[in-house]
Every structure is written in C-alpha cells, then in structure tokens.
Image (spheres, rainbow, N blue to C red):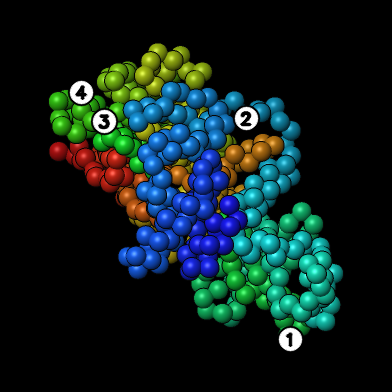
Amino acid sequence: MSVALIYAINRGYQVHPDAFAFLKSLDCDVEKIIRTIVEAKNKFKMKSPILIDDIKNAISPAVNHINKPEIANTNKTTETDDDGYKIIFDPTNMINSDEKKNFFKIFESRYKKTLKILSSRPESRQLRKIKNIKEFRNKSRFNSLDKENGGPQIIDSVFVAGLIMLKKNRMNDVELVIDDTTGSIPAVCRTRDLISEASTLVLDQMLMLEISPSKRNSNDFIVKDIIFPDIPEHVPSKSGTESYVALISDLHVGSKYFMEKEFKDFVSWLSSDDDIVRKINFVCIAGDIVDGIGIYPNQDRELIDLNIKSQISYAADLLEKIPKRMHVFLIPGNHDPGRRALPQTALTNLRDFKSLENFSILGNPSFIELNRVKLLMFHGQSLDDVIATVPGLSYSKPVEAMKILLRSRHLSPIYGNRTPIAPESEDMLVIDDVPDVFHAGHVHITQVGRYKGTLIVNSGAWQRQTKFQQTMGINPTPGICILVNLATLQSFKRDFNY
C-alpha cells in the first residue's frame, strides 16, 4: 500500500482520504491500480486528486463487486441493495435515561471522537498536549519541544487540538481559549484572514490550531492556522437505478396554521400515476410531526387541538395514507412528545404510530442508506444557536448554518444555549461518517445547497407563519416537498401552494 502511495505522490498526484480508505478495503494489487490511474491521468494531462471513481474505473466490475467497502453498521440492518435501505445509526437503544448528570463524559467523548477525525490530517502528526506546550513557554525551550521526534530540533510552531472554551472579539484581534484533556491555552488570531475564519467558530466545537510563541510576550501564543475537522471533498455515492426520495418536515398537526389541505394534496399526489411518483421509493420526515403543547409562550392560543394524544392520532391517520410501497423514515423534533434533549429517542412508544407498517420510526439524529446513498436526518434544533452566534447567518438561509455543522463535524456543538443536550456517556451528535445527503428542518425555510460533495436540504414546513414566528422574524416557505433523484443526487421542488 505504501509503495503505491509513494508512486502516486512522486508523480504529483494526491490520494483523496475517501479513496485511500477504499483502497485499503480491496484485496487485490493496489499498486497496479494506482499505476493504471496515474498513466491515464498523465495521458489526458489531468492533475486532479485520485478519487474513488478513478479506482472503480481502473478495476474490473467483478473485483469492484466482490470488494466493495461496507459501511459500519452501529444499529439494526435491513436488507439493502440498489432497491433497498439500511439503518446505519439510530440513537434510541443507546440512550440511557437513568444516566447521572456527568457532562464530563460527553465532552470527553466529543474530544476523542473528533480527534480521531482530525488524525487523518497530516498536521496531526505534530500534535502536542497543552500541558506539554505550557511547559515550554519561553522561546528557547519552545524551540526544543520536538526533541521526542529525533531532536532537539528548532521549530517555529506546534499544533494543538481541543474544544473552544472562549471566543473573545477584541479591537484588533480575536482571542481563542481551547481545552484538551490536560488543560487549556489561550491563542490570538491577528491576521485579517484568521480573524474572519474565527468569526465562524462556535463555542464547544473541536478544532486544531497551529500556534507559535509571541515575539512580544513569551507567555502569549499566536494562531498561525485554524484547521477544522470538516468533511472532506468527496464523490458522493449514488444509486445504480433511478429512484427518488421525498424530503419533508415540520407538519405541526394540531396547530391552527397546519396546512391540512396542502398536505393532503401532497399525500394524494404520492398515490397518483405521475411519472415521478412511480419512482419515489422513500419518504423522509425530519421531525415536528405535531405542534405539541407548552412548547412556547401562549401556544394554546394557536392550537385547534389541546390534546397531545389527539394530535398524534390525527397525524397517524394522515401519514397512514402514504402508499405502502414507499418506505417512510420518521424522526422526532422539539415539538413532538417525549424527551426534548438531544439525542432524542424514537416515537415508538406511541400506539398510533405502531400501526404504520411501512414506517421506520427512528431517533433524532439518524443515519440511513437509501439505494447506497447515505442520508443524515436531523431535526435541526441547534440551527437556532448557530444562526444566533455566527455573524452573517440568518433564518432565511439555513443551508449556510448547516454547513457550519458539517464543518465542525457536530450536529449541536454549542452547549448551554437554546438546544438542550443530554449528559450521555457517548456524544452521539458527532458526525462520524460523511453523508451524501444532509436533511434537516426546524426553521421552516425550504433551501437546497451543496458542500464538498454533500447535498444539503432544509425541507421547510407544512405550517403557515405563526404569531410566534412573526416575533422571531421568520418568514416560512411552507407547503413544498423536496425530491432527490438518488441516481444523480439532483433535487427539485414540488410546490403544493396552488
């Protein structure tokens, strides 16, 4: 394997991390494959990185079939091929409701899991613990810090990884304080580019910093680079046959503003003989099935049904009319009954939902695979905190906030604001696997975008603007379904606001 990588690098070709993982899964002559790819790229004067598709094109169909990489399954599995689905992750059975409130465990888990993601970066080889860096505060000793790697050696900077404990915007710079398992350390961003990049950081997210001692004060450290866990630039998986998934969220059944007619039109359309409908195999619903009770001040004035059981029962009646040939994946939101803190358990204890035979009732968040396309479902509660924290973000453009989550590799990095996070022993909100599609709701704004190969969808709502939303300055775009072609990952809207 190492010989093949050296061959590619010596000829000016980088191997994408996803491609590297794919190569490791193959039981064949990897060096021969790399040589074939390099020769082809040289022939056509292509200097692009080696990707998974390059590897697949270089090996025979038989080898590609036999040695295709399997996605780690951390939960139950359903039969899957080009016309099937797989539930990769559902937090429901991993949640411990009796857990003592020990937030140290969840942040330790976040640190370790994200550090593992960062370890794929070449800079990680130079990582140092904060405790060790602080022991070398004066410049002469700092220059000897790398003695464990054959030193002592003269170095200008070191790398450190940790959770952001403080972000302080000052007159001409931004101070960051990050924390690892050995302590915390302050570092200052002074250049225009780093100050701009620091503005997108949120508290409690994990990152890597390259720092060097200040020439003015040996007790200060200056940030030279900010390295995010981030998702890699990647080629998304696609279905081998044309099929569609319909993405919706935020029905809010029980609200005076629930768009009952439009939603029934949507369900009727799913039962029609439309050319597209015949290719819809899946429906994903990203939470807030009902409006709930007592979720926000004076909510009772905006409800037509003050009984949560009645709301659930009617919602189940509506959902039951989705054609049985379509498999539906449903996760809860902050308005639905049950646990409010993330991660949320599936609504499987609701009698009315148990009768929905073509449904997979999952927790929030959940990770599924549809015809080989990996889809991350998350209701999106934390978008409130991200939009309120990062300059330039707004409810009108939720995709930009969702990019922040992908970049930080965490679905709810900020602790202590509007989004409650439970003190589980494992942080189940870390984005371990890279999704091909990232689907959320919550903000009631329909928007689609892309980031480094991932299709990002916020699927809006089926509720007109409420009085509460008016006070929040939210202008929803309801009554729209987002359809995604799993063979191309192209999306389009189907508007039911006739």
Left or right placement of residue 128 versus residue 22 in this view: right
Q: Quadrant of the C terminus?
A: top left
Q: Is residue 242 above or below residue 310?
A: below
Residue 95's tag is: 2
Compute the Cα span from label 3 to label 1.
64 Å
Closer to viewer: mark 3 or mark 1? 3
The reply to whether the C-beta atoms of the residues labelled 3 and 1 are less than 8 Å apart is no
**In which quarter of the view is residue 441 placed?**
top left
The image position of residue 292, as x and y in percent, is 44, 29
Q: Is residue 441 above or below residue 192?
A: above
Compute the Cα span from label 2 to label 4.
37 Å
Identify which amino acid the numbered label 1 is placed on: Arg
The reply to whether the C-beta atoms of the residues labelled 2 and 4 are less than 8 Å apart is no
The residue carrying mark 4 is 271
Mark 4 surroundings within 10 Å by alpha-carbon count, few (fewer than 14), some (14 through 19), many (20 or more): some
Can the viewer see residue 34 in this picture?
Answer: yes
